[in-house]
Amino acid sequence: MTKGDTKLKVQSISKRFGQVIALKDVSFSLRQGEFLTMLGPSGSGKTTTLRAIAGFNPPDTGSIRLAETDVAKLPPNKRNIGMVFQDYALFPHLSIAQNVGFPLEARGVQRAERKRLVDEMIGVVGLAGMEGRMPRQLSGGQQQRVALARALVFKPELVLLDEPLAALDKKLRMSMQLEILRITRQVGATVISVTHDQEEALVMSDRIALFSKGELAQIGKPEELYRGPKSRFVADFIGEANLIEGNVENASGKLCFSGPGFVADVPDGANRELRAGDKACLVIRPESLRVHTEPDSSNGLMNRVAATVRDIIYLGVECKVIAEIGQVPVQVRSRDLSLMQTLQAGKPVKLTWNPEDAIFLPSSQ
């Protein structure tokens, strides 16, 4: 199987625990060498989907095809899947080399070949020279590398990561995101990771599968979910977003959006489902808004709105402005740090944005 071929196909799987529907008709596919992150709030179905793929909680209905074989009813040890658990699950009485070599020994690989593969994988994860250490002698990041090496050493069809960075502090978590990418790409692994951390998902993923209430809300490249959310839930969950309710109107044959005290362009093709008379939600990312302190500095742009400053927060390389449009709170992120001196709480300002930076969604979503 070559890079880009379909490695995994999940088709219409559902899972119920008593009266609770944990998964409802979930379908997606995964390509060879792809890194997919399943993201969502607690109880959204992402971990249940991972455990269904692993074989710990087989689905009630649907199929899971791995390398052209339906594995939905197979036990975990028959699926040729590697897994890294949240707590790493290293054997405390075994050395690094013994931990990494355990799945090879369980598969009956001869000692000489086993040593070669273990040494090779320990080198890939950057722990050469530490083969004889015990797990208690390792840092959290090192333990995680051992767990990843153990999951990769037998060349599984698929690697599953269950919140692999949750136990690490923020700074180490950021460095390990890139390290996991390096390691999995170097060996050509096909990976599914589960997390509730959206920044982690944006950094590490070829694609993101966003779950909500047991269903797949949207799947796509990180920039597709960020720039082109298909629902209010997706827009609100991925990154920061300003959500403003209003109505779609027809102005001289062209659609416009009427919000609280302002009117904005609706670009052609912004959302083909919108019609004049619809209620809609305007989505604007904080970095897409600009603050104008002078009355005429917005140059008469249609996409402008009067707002009142409520707070200015210093964030190092940028500042965050909290403002209100009527009673609607909005956030602005700007690298113009002079705003820290020019803005004051209670001061009126104008907010503007480019029409192409706005996202319009039906309110029913």
Image: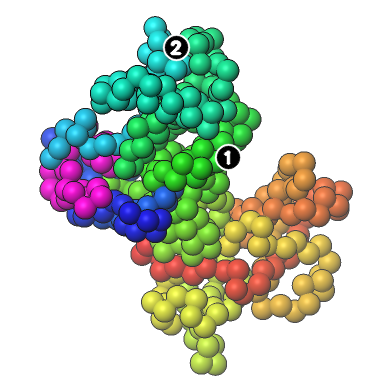
Residue closest to the eye, 353 or 186: 186
* Residue type, mark 2 in image: Ser
Residue under label 1, please give it.
178
Seen in the image, is 322 located left or right of residue 273?
A: right
Residue sticking out furthest to the top: 93
Residue 169 included in the magenta stretch of the image = no
* Residue drawn where x is 60% and y is 68% of the image: 357
Q: Is residue 250 above or below residue 332?
A: below
Q: Is residue 304 above or below residue 226?
A: below
Q: 10 Å neighbourhood of mark 2: few (<14), some, or many (≥20)?
A: some
Residue under label 2, please give it.
95
Point out the image quarter for the C terminus.
bottom left
* Residue drawn where x is 21% and y is 32% of the image: 76
Q: 10 Å neighbourhood of mark 1: few (<14), some, or many (≥20)?
A: few
**Alpha carbon separation for disc pair 2 and 1:** 26 Å
* Residue drawn where x is 81% and y is 54% of the image: 336
Seen in the image, is 20 located left or right of residue 243?
A: left
Q: Quadrant of residue 234?
A: bottom left
| Extent of the magenta region | 46-72
Q: Quadrant of residue 334?
A: bottom right
**Colour pattern of the rendering:** rainbow
* Residue type, mark 1 in image: Leu
Residue closest to the eye, 167 or 294: 167
Residue 316 in picture, x, y percent from top left: 77, 41
